[in-house]
Structures are given as structure tokens and as C-alpha cells.
Amino acid sequence: MIHFLLIDCPDEPGLVYRVTEVLYRYGLNVLRNGEFVDRHDQHFFMRTEFDGPCEPKTLLQELRAALPPTARVRLRNDQPRRIVLLATKEHHCLSELLVRHFFGQLHAEILAVVSNHDTLRAITEKLGVPYHHLSAEGLSREAHEAALLTQIEYYQPEFVVLARYMRILSSEFVAHFPERLINIHHSFLPAFIGASPYAQAYERGVKSIGATAHFVTDQLDQGPIIAQSVIPTDHTQSARDMAQAGRDVEKLTLARALTLVFREQVAVHRNRTIVFE
Amino acid sequence: MIHFLLIDCPDEPGLVYRVTEVLYRYGLNVLRNGEFVDRHDQHFFMRTEFDGPCEPKTLLQELRAALPPTARVRLRNDQPRRIVLLATKEHHCLSELLVRHFFGQLHAEILAVVSNHDTLRAITEKLGVPYHHLSAEGLSREAHEAALLTQIEYYQPEFVVLARYMRILSSEFVAHFPERLINIHHSFLPAFIGASPYAQAYERGVKSIGATAHFVTDQLDQGPIIAQSVIPTDHTQSARDMAQAGRDVEKLTLARALTLVFREQVAVHRNRTIVFE
Amino acid sequence: MIHFLLIDCPDEPGLVYRVTEVLYRYGLNVLRNGEFVDRHDQHFFMRTEFDGPCEPKTLLQELRAALPPTARVRLRNDQPRRIVLLATKEHHCLSELLVRHFFGQLHAEILAVVSNHDTLRAITEKLGVPYHHLSAEGLSREAHEAALLTQIEYYQPEFVVLARYMRILSSEFVAHFPERLINIHHSFLPAFIGASPYAQAYERGVKSIGATAHFVTDQLDQGPIIAQSVIPTDHTQSARDMAQAGRDVEKLTLARALTLVFREQVAVHRNRTIVFE
Amino acid sequence: MIHFLLIDCPDEPGLVYRVTEVLYRYGLNVLRNGEFVDRHDQHFFMRTEFDGPCEPKTLLQELRAALPPTARVRLRNDQPRRIVLLATKEHHCLSELLVRHFFGQLHAEILAVVSNHDTLRAITEKLGVPYHHLSAEGLSREAHEAALLTQIEYYQPEFVVLARYMRILSSEFVAHFPERLINIHHSFLPAFIGASPYAQAYERGVKSIGATAHFVTDQLDQGPIIAQSVIPTDHTQSARDMAQAGRDVEKLTLARALTLVFREQVAVHRNRTIVFE
């Protein structure tokens, strides 16, 4: 079975040598290897994809013994991740993920879609995924988030993906999913933080619009960026046109970010990501 | 001789018809024609490139008679624009413009380069352009800008181009050059306003960096955007690497913006540009 | 109701003036106007989007009277186009179009999907479109194409779209759909004509891969190009990886080409397209 | 001093481990490390950038001892490469390289420019580089190439760069510079091989144009591709417009390819390149 190994620790000489020595000793076949040293922080990152008979517990022990005590070591097999999607009314990101999932191309199992509206039930259920409508009407934010949380935790997902979920989540909610909650923001962050980025982009008269997939932290639109893309726009596009044109770049940026995360290609360090491509 | 006609006015029916009727009556050969209506503001824009025997004064009179009284009508021939460049120490934008100028590919005559440092004298003079070093050392901003202004006005330029000029200009200075002062900002505005945008971009961990050419107004980095471009970056690039990688996109974005402006392809309306490509 | 007007004819002075005069006289409100003159061929193209009470027959007569006798004049309203899709086994282009159709974002009604395999029945039927499996097994090409043709003509579509249909169609078949048959080719044409373009691209070691949407003519992969896009690749990608990465660019390129064609933004002239954006 | 190590050999287990063991033993500080295995050919590639006291001869011996006997091992320090440029009449690629060289940003010393025309003498000499005009008029190809070769070999360059040199070079000439002769082709290869690619692109009505930097082999435009870039075009551009628009992408693509080659980031294997970025 294929495994993904992700390591980070303070840099020191010989780290690659020590890690590859362990893998070599265990007869594991390295398929792909990437290292990166953040010179600014003197911090070392390494991602290895290997094949072979792997007894995870033993291997982790050996790797930890070979590395500095503060090293973070993550070892995962390549089984699909278990995920829950949150959505509101816009379908494009949700549809993209549902279709990929339907054809087994998402590296993940979508356990359910949870939404504050009932708009996207049809596409979700047709493509074979349970849909939960949890209206926020008449509820306090706390009460609505409590309901969301209960529904999500029922599925015990590894990741929660905001597929154009249009309500701001509280710090308390976000705190349940450290490095496990992923959002697609419909602008080139940090250009247009907050609501209505296309309206802001139109007002400012920009010549490009973009999308940013990022981990969600307790600071709005400030979490570590996983992937960004940009397409040209011009004066002929209204804010509404920009929103339409932006849909394609949003859905592909989110899908790409998820693939990176689900295959353990993304390490997070001090609000920045190291992405092994 | 080829002429460029740029019109904007409140929209009403028949404007294209009325303008083309005048040009047709004068036997002018339309080479290229573009119209745009800003639906939001109900404002009409039209750019026409035409060839033929043109007596500008008469033609302008006829066009004005055919248009609403508030219409702005600009008629220019395709002679090179007269420009002055301001620079500091970084050469890449300046070199790009000097080389294009040397080979007659800038649609402009560079009358002089003015700089607060002496660093770029050699490249400028080798490529045949006068270089004026006006140090800011020991001078108040007012005094330095007064010296700049005197030197620039000596040349009576149509446009002043900030080719990586690294000092902030006062509102008073800027006010001398409405829609005639063009800057290249080394980020995708409005993402990183102000100083050290690459350092800011590095800190934020963005996955793309860009450049923005814009008209300068009295609000820092807030003027109408003429052109923007973006290139990918990643975690392997330090702020300094990003700055290096950004040079190419800066110089091409600036050169493209200038071509657009010099050929009257850019109308300005409420802090946004309409660009006829 | 909004109408699209597409005109082409040999160039001569005053064409824009004459066309806009007719529209002005009929009180039609021009929303968008584009003209282009191919200097090489001295040929004129114009596209106008207008709103207002339009009696098509009268208007066409007036326009034809105002234009040279060889002019081609096309007038269409903005109702959805009636289309049939052909597919084989790969889902990505088909799914993209089915999802857009499901949410009313395709500017077209998909009347049916016809395929030489049964693989894509589920996604098609779940999204509410009839699916016809016409196997080619045991049939001559003539016999299979005859069956295809019967099935397609049953629906009387305006356009037929090859959404990764993997069989080469005969000249006879193609001749039934002049400027009405659209294909997505999975390479940057004319780089890799014919079968297995990703395998060819891998062999050649290219650093970018692309997709080309084009009208189908009787010469394989040689018809007028409507849209092209390109994404970077590198040595780490096998031919199979390239094919996977190429899917996204294929589906978006096809969707964009269809939007252009369905909104009458594409004129064809001597195996090239004029695209009004 | 910083060194670049480039290794390739048939793949087998433990190669990374064995190489990093040697570097670790010699106390060398790995700054950057990249590996790649071509699964199709079972071939291993590795590039390492390291700092520290390096005695090249000893280190090479040790590395060779640790690797399979057929391994190719290349060890270079980061001193500027010695290069000669060939050009004809178009300045854009030549100017780009001369300006970068003038400011010490090319990772190379340009020893001389050799041209079959005298057109580009001024820019070359102003920027401090010797210029040799070797006219081909009245000479057989053999005689002209012999003159070229004599002039080039006088400088003993490590690389020869064709900066828009417009004559086809014979196999005999090319054979003198295996993996040392680099060309910029003004199209997205293999789309438009041979002469006048922009005219071909115009005829075909493509929607993107590109540039390809590649090593020259004895097959015209068929050598290993180092870098490619693409920009959009459309029907409004004549073949001449495309050529103008293409200049920027050509010069940046060539400059990028040279940086990659000069910093030993490019391995060649079976007419394909492995590029460590």
C-alpha cells in the first residue's frame, strides 16, 4: 500500500540522510521525495511517497528516533479521506466536488452535504450523497452552529469543506477543526477580504479576478493559503459578470487544493503552507 | 495620417450612428472601432482609429455638435508621445523602456530620465537619453519635489512615468499631472498597498504575485488601474526571490500599459479605466 | 427581447454607419456592438446585441438593403439553443455540460446524449437528459453513422457537440452539420493532431498542454478554432497524468466555446473564426 | 562556495540515501535537493545544491563509488557560465540578455555576439560586449559555418545561445555543441516547425501563440524542450501583430531557460528534459 510521510522540524545537517536510511532499512520503495528548508526560520520539511509493506507504528517509532524530539511526523495511507461539505445556494463548487466524487476522482468520500438552505438538495441527492438542511432562520448564531456541529460530528469527518458556504463561522466553531476546515474565498486574497469581493473588485476596477483556497482559522479570510488562481477581467464585466466568470476559477482552485491536502502534500507552518507538488 | 478618437458621454440612443455619420461624411476610413456602455452609470465610451485627410479643428466641431454637450472628445494623431521617466535604483523597468525606445518601439520619445540616485546613469546615457540626478538628501520633500518639477517641466512632457521610483509623491506634485502620471506598483493591487509589497506577500504566504500599472492620484496606490498581470509563486521563494521573479511581470505590465495609454486606448471614468484592446 | 445580429461582407466605407442607421430608425437599443475588418482579405464583420421590439423579417430586409448583396446577415434571439451531445466513456466534458444545463447556465437545451458506450448513462439520466446507447460493435462505420444520424435528426438540434466522442466521423457525416458540429480536441492544435495527443505530448517532452475547441470539417482536427487554453506541465507527469490534468482545461475550453457560439459571438471566415468577446 | 550536483542513473533502491550519506560525511550543507524517477524508463535523477568546503575531485570519486557504474555525475560551482550569443536582425532576445548581463543578472558572462548582419552592433557595443559581423553573403553554408565556428571557438564558450539567429545550422555545426547549443523558437513547438511560425499560426487561426526554448540537435526544432510559454491571441492580430506580441514571451522564455541551464537545473534524457525548479 502507498503511504504519505510528512515531516517538519528545526533544520539540522543530515535529516534527509537519516530519514531515507530508515526507509531504506525497511525495504520501502520511495516513489517521490521532496524536501524544503525555510532558510528564514531554519525549519525543515520533507514529504515522501512510498510503497511497500509498512507497519505504521514501528516505522513511526524509528522515524521519531532518527529525528529531533520536536519533529512533527505524519504518516497516512492513500485511502480516500472522509469529508463533509457545507454549502449555501450557489452550486458550482458543490457540483464540481459531487461529480468528481461520483466518478471516484476526489480522493475522498463525501459523507454528507450540510446547508443552511434547501436549494442544492436535488443535485446532491441525485449524485448519491445525503443532504441535511439546517436553516438558520430564527436561530442565534450559537444555536445554528451547535446544530451544524452535531450534524457534522455525527459523520466523524477528517475534513470539512466550505463549498461556498456563505455564513461567517465563529472562532468557537472553527476551533473544532484545526487544519481540517477548508474554504474557497472568491477573490485573490488578501485583495478583497470579507463580503461581496466581486462588488469590491468591480468598484476598484481591477483587471484580474481570482480565487483562494485556504485553511480556516479564527481570523476571517486570514488562514494559510493552499492554492490561488487568477483570470483576466476587464471594464466590460459588471460585478455580476465577474461573479459568473469567477465560478470556474473558484471550483477548480478548490478541487486542486483538496487534492493537495488529501494526498498530504500540504504542510502548515506559521500561517503559511509548504506545498509539495 | 492615422488619428485616434476617444469619446465619452452619458448614454443615449444613436450615438454610434451619429459619430460614424460624421466620419463617413468626411470620407475618413475607420480602421478600428470600439464602443462600450457602462450600464451601471448609463455612460457611453467610444474609440475610433481612422485614416484619411483630417482637419482636426473642423472635425472636433462637427463631432461636438453631434454629441451631448457634456461629451468629452479627445482627438490625437499617432505621433510618439513626449515622456519623462522617474527612476530610483532598480533598473528593470527603466531598461525595458529605454531598449524599446532605442529601437523605436515605445510609441514615445523619452526626453529624459530623472532620478533621486545616480545608479542608473550608465544604462540611460549609453542608450542615448539625458539623465538628471536630483538627490533628495538633506532636502525637505517640498524642496525635492520642487526641483523634480522644475526639471520635468523643462521638457514639457505629455506623460510622466514612474519606472520604479521609490519615493512617495505629495498630492500637490501629483495634481500637476492629472491622468498623465503613470506608476507600476509591484503587487496585485489592492492586495498589498504601500511599501515592501513582496515582504508582505511573503508573510501572507500567497501563491501568486503580480504587478499593477495605474494612473497616480492623490490617494496612495488607489488610482485607476490600467493593466495587471500575475505569475505563480510558492513557498520556496523568499521575499527577495519574489521580488526578483516579479521584475519580469512588472516591466512587461508597465510597457503594455504605456502602449495602451499612448495609443489612446484608455478612458478614465470614476476611478476605473475603460481599455479598448 | 434581446437579439444577436452577425454580419459579414466585403469591406467598404460606411458599413457601421448604415447598419446603426437602420437600428436607430427602428428604435432598437444597442447593448453591445463590435466590428472587425480583416485587412488582409478586406472583409468586414460586425456583431450587435440589441433590445427592443423587433420584427425579424422586416429588419432583415432593411439590413440587406443597406448592405452589399453578398453580405451574410444572421439574426437570432437569445433563446436557448437546441443541442445534442455525443460522448464515449470519459465523463468530464459531458458532466460539465450536464451540470451547467441542470442549473440553466448553458444557454442551451440538451435534448439528448448519444454514445457508442453505455458508461455515461447514469450521470446523464440522473441529471434529467435522455441517453441513447448506439453501440458500434459489429457495424460498419457507415451503418453506425447512419444510426447516429437518425437518432440525432430525430431531435432536430441546432448544434451537435462532441463531448470527448472518440470515433472519427466521416466526411459524409460531417457534411450534415456545417458550422454546427463542435469538437473538443485534447491538445493545443495543431501541435498534436489525431489519436493519443497526450502520449505524443509526453514523448515530445512539452512543458505545456492544452485543449482546442473547434468546428468540425471534413479534414481531421483542421476546422476553424473557436477557443484554446493551455496549462503548464513538466517532466514529472506521465502521459496518463497529463491526460488527467488536461481534463479541467478541456471541459472549460469546451464550455467557453459553446457559450461563444450559442450567443452568436463567432463568425467563420476561410477556416478561421472571428470571436466577438 | 555553492556547488550544483546533477546525477542520473538507472533507478535502484537507496540512491538518495547513498548520495546524502556521502554529502553528510563530508560535512556539506544541503541547500536544496530534488529527486525524480522516470517510472517509464526506471531512471533516477537527482539535483543537489550544497554549500561548504568541497574538494571536487575527491567528492566525485566518492559519489561515483556510491552509485551504479553507468551513473552520470555532474558537479559544477556557481560561477557565471561563459557564453557566446548568435543573432541576426531582431533585437528583443539579444537586448534582454545584454541588459541582464550588464547588471550582472544572467548567471553568465557574454563573451561576444556573433551575427550574420551588422544591425545589432550598436546595442551590443554600448552594453560592453564585442560584436563580430560575419556576413553569409557570397559564402557557401559550409564556408560561413566554418567562419562562425572559428570565431566562436576563439572564445571557448561553455554554451552558445541562438538569440533569434535566423539561419538553419547544419548537423555538422550542431555536433560541436552537444547539450551546449540553445535556441528560442518562436512558436509553441511542435505546433509550427520551421520558417515563419507566426504566418503559419495566423493561417491556422490559433487563439494562443507561444515560444519554446530548446537544446539544438541535428533534427530541426526537435531537440529537448527546456521551457515553453504561451500568450493569448485572437482574430484581430495579423501575422505581423502576432510576431510583435510574441517578442515578449520569446525573450522571457529564453532568459528563463538559460537561468535553468546555467544553474544546472536541467538534465537531458532521451530527447526530454528533467527540470528541477
Image (spheres, coloured by chain):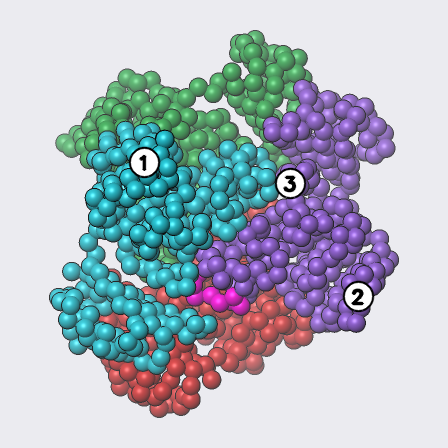
Chain colours: A purple, B cyan, C red, D green
Residue B245 horizontal/vertical position (percent): 47, 37
Marker disc for residue A272? 3
One can see residue D142 in this view? no
Is residue B207 found inside the magenta-colored segment of the image? no
For discs 1 and 3, the disc positioned in front in the rendered view:
1
Amino acid bearing label 2:
Ser
Highlighted magenta segment, given as a residue range: A234-241
Q: Is residue B277 visible?
A: yes
Q: Nearer the viewer, residue B270 or A119?
A: B270
Q: Secondary structure at mark 1?
A: strand
Write down the chain letter for disc 2: A
Which residue: 78% across, 49% down?
A175
Q: Are marks 1 and 3 on the same chain?
A: no
Which residue in the structure is indicated by mark 1?
B115
- Above/below status of A7 relative to C269: above
Residue at the disc numbered 2:
A140
For the residues labelled 1 and 2, the Cα–Cα distance comes to: 60 Å
| Image mark count | 3
The C terminus of chain C, quarter of image: bottom left
Indicate the secondary structure of the residue bearing disc 3.
Answer: strand
